[in-house]
Amino acid sequence: MCPSKVADGGERGWIVPIGGAENKEDNPRILKRFLDLCGGRDAEIVVIPTASQLADTGSRYEDIFGDLGASRVDVLDFDTRRDCHEQNRLDRIERASGIFFTGGNQLRLSTILGGTPAAKLIRERNASGITVGGTSAGASILSEHMIGFGKEGASPQADSVRLAPGLGLTNRFIIDQHFRQRDRLGRLVAALAYNPFAIGIGLDEDTAAFIGPDNTLEVEGSGAVTVVDADGLTFSSMAQVSENKPVCLLGLTVHILVAGATFNLHTRKASAGSLAQSKS
Amino acid sequence: MCPSKVADGGERGWIVPIGGAENKEDNPRILKRFLDLCGGRDAEIVVIPTASQLADTGSRYEDIFGDLGASRVDVLDFDTRRDCHEQNRLDRIERASGIFFTGGNQLRLSTILGGTPAAKLIRERNASGITVGGTSAGASILSEHMIGFGKEGASPQADSVRLAPGLGLTNRFIIDQHFRQRDRLGRLVAALAYNPFAIGIGLDEDTAAFIGPDNTLEVEGSGAVTVVDADGLTFSSMAQVSENKPVCLLGLTVHILVAGATFNLHTRKASAGSLAQSKS
């Protein structure tokens, strides 16, 4: 599913993938910033807990966004593909100023939402300016090429990773989450090796990439965002290598970004941002 | 401890760090190649099991190198610093065509051997042409700056890693071993961030870097060697960051090498080597 076209003179909304386990209590800076981008006290948030199979996942975010001051929060569960065609649900998405996907299993999101009017409408709404974010599985689903599952902890191998089509708000990056906590560098690098056009974004827990309309990624949270850029790759053995064997990849560029630093997904330039001025 | 000078017209011997858990039975290709570099059937190997506190570590390698055809294998344990001054042990090092350090704890090696005549002699012998290698802790000890211990599994942090002086056969690289199996990228990157002059070499298990007299690194074994080059670093927050906080590092170059690929530690160029010709 390709990203929706942004209207002439318009601006895409923010895309906010979060690495999972974001702070929800004493310092919910990620969720607060997400809410601010959705309009703060005027925000009307739709929470989609479809990835999760826990009964209280949606209501938990409803409480959090409510406590942070949202004007309205609706939990919109899509349990079947038929739900994704229901007009009253689509109307809620149409009115929302922000959409948030909870964690769980990203293949539940892609199998239930994929190709439905709900998915199409969310893409269109983001292209027309509203903020869409998600945590963990809800982060993975945002891009066009999604890591469905894969091996953790090994060097990249030919069969490290299984990709699936995601929601497709953008095709510029591939997300992985719980990144260092679950040692997912190998599978992210394998995903990029299939086709180096995309940029790999590995999100630590309690860490988010706030991706603005200008494709500048800003980091928020307590961990790091590992950006892997395969654009300068000088050699890859991906096409020749047999299963369970490591892949040879020469010339990857890696940036480890923390809050304050930025990366432009268009120019592929990393910047220390406010960190460079922090010497006093 | 700085590397010994190579005599005019002479050549340094091979340096062979191995990532631990090398195949010792059905396909001991790494130990076989090590032995070949020591002279094959003429090889006189000294095995130093000081890192290990298991009684049979030395004798196990004695058997393996014997079975592979070495002319002579001596296990030379150094249990105290006084042992490292004993003339008959130094004489054995003087006669050896290859020296092999077993795994265990690299801080045992550095605390017992560091600054003794045995350490000095091993450096001199390598500078004069003999092969020196080691596995796991025995790999870490080979370079001048050694990872003593550190955190596994996290993004690089200011306190991810503790360096200690190693044996100092070379200062061109910093080794980490059991690399992907124990998720040590963060600590290796942190070590490089302290001073980007060195090149980071992360060795998977059953994988070795065979580093020739011309500083070309060749990969052998079933896993990958992750080379991290911080020479192009455009920003590092290492000097400002507080403990337990991730470090911002922009512009790392990473190569994932497998058997057949090479990296020149002098020119910092990676090559696909024989992999590039494997298309038939």
Image (tube, coloured by chain):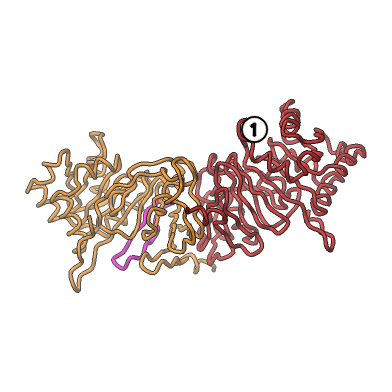
Chain colours: A red, B orange
Residue B11 picture quarter: bottom left
Q: Identify the element where label 1 is drawn.
A: loop
Q: Amino acid at mark 1?
A: Lys
Q: Residues within 10 Å of mark 1 (few under 14, many from 20)?
A: some
Residue B183 picture location, percent across and down: 46, 43
Q: Magenta includes A252?
A: no
The residue at the far bottom in this view is B9
- Residue found at the far top of this picture: A55
The residue under label 1 is: A24
Q: Position of residue B26 (x, y in %)?
A: 38, 46
- Judge by depth and name the residue closer to the eye, A15 or B48: A15
Q: Chain of mark 1?
A: A
Q: Is residue B221 magenta?
A: yes
- Residue at 61 percent of width and 57 percent of height: A263
**B140 relative position to B238: left or right:** left
Span shown in magenta: B207-222
Report whether B209 appears left or right of B71.
right
Asked whether residue B39 is in view, the answer is no
